[in-house]
């Protein structure tokens, strides 16, 4: 995958230059297929399929946090929220906001197809 992304560029979230949706910005159109991952009534999560590698780069939707020595309370919160290493996952607060499960399942099926 590193070879497929060797020409990657860093895009910063600020300043905002537009709203992302199912149509990619022209600079990304040849490389990414974005779509809105539905099911969260509080907002849209835009997911990008990188065509060349067949991968989906994730940002805040999937997290993995290493436990820290001397921080048992923090480590327990990471484990309870589902983001502790080695497996990680979608944080509990994110999972709880996807209340429209049928729409979320349809988005997941589309992503995996």
Image: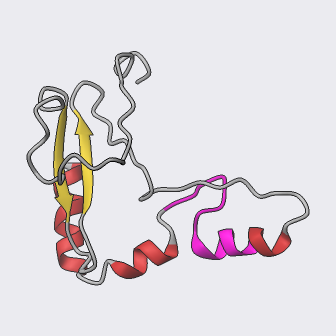
Q: Nearer the viewer, residue 101 or 94?
A: 94
Q: Which residues are magenta?
A: 76-89
x and y percent of residue 110 in the render? 16, 55
Relative to 94, 77 lies left or right: right
Relative to 12, 100 lies left or right: left
69 versus 73 height, above or below? above
Relative to 108, 78 lies left or right: right
5 versus 91 height, above or below? above
Residue lying at 26% horizontally and 72% vertically, measured from the top left = 43
Query: How does the figure colour the protein chain or chains?
Result: secondary structure
Q: Nearer the viewer, residue 88 or 22?
A: 22
Residue 77 on the magenta segment: yes
Residue 9 on the magenta segment: no
x and y percent of residue 37 in the render? 22, 62
Residue lying at 23% horizontally and 80% vertically, measured from the top left = 41
Relative to 46, 29 lies left or right: left
x and y percent of residue 78 in the render? 66, 68
Query: Which quadrant is the N terminus positioned in?
Result: top left
66 versus 45 height, above or below? above
**Quadrant in the picture for residue 97:** bottom left
């Amino acid at each position: 995958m590193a070879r497929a992304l060797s020409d990657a560029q860093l895009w910063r979230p600020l300043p905002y230059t537009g709203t992302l949706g199912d149509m990619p910005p022209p600079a990304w159109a040849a490389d990414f297929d974005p779509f809105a991952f539905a099911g969260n009534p509080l907002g849209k999560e835009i997911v990008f399929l990188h065509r060349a590698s067949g991968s989906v780069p994730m940002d805040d939707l999937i997290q993995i946090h290493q436990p820290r020595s001397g921080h048992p309370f923090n480590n327990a919160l990471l484990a309870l929220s589902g983001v502790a290493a080695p497996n990680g996952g979608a944080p509990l607060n994110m999972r709880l906001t996807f209340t429209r499960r049928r729409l979320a399942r349809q988005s997941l099926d589309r992503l995996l197809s």
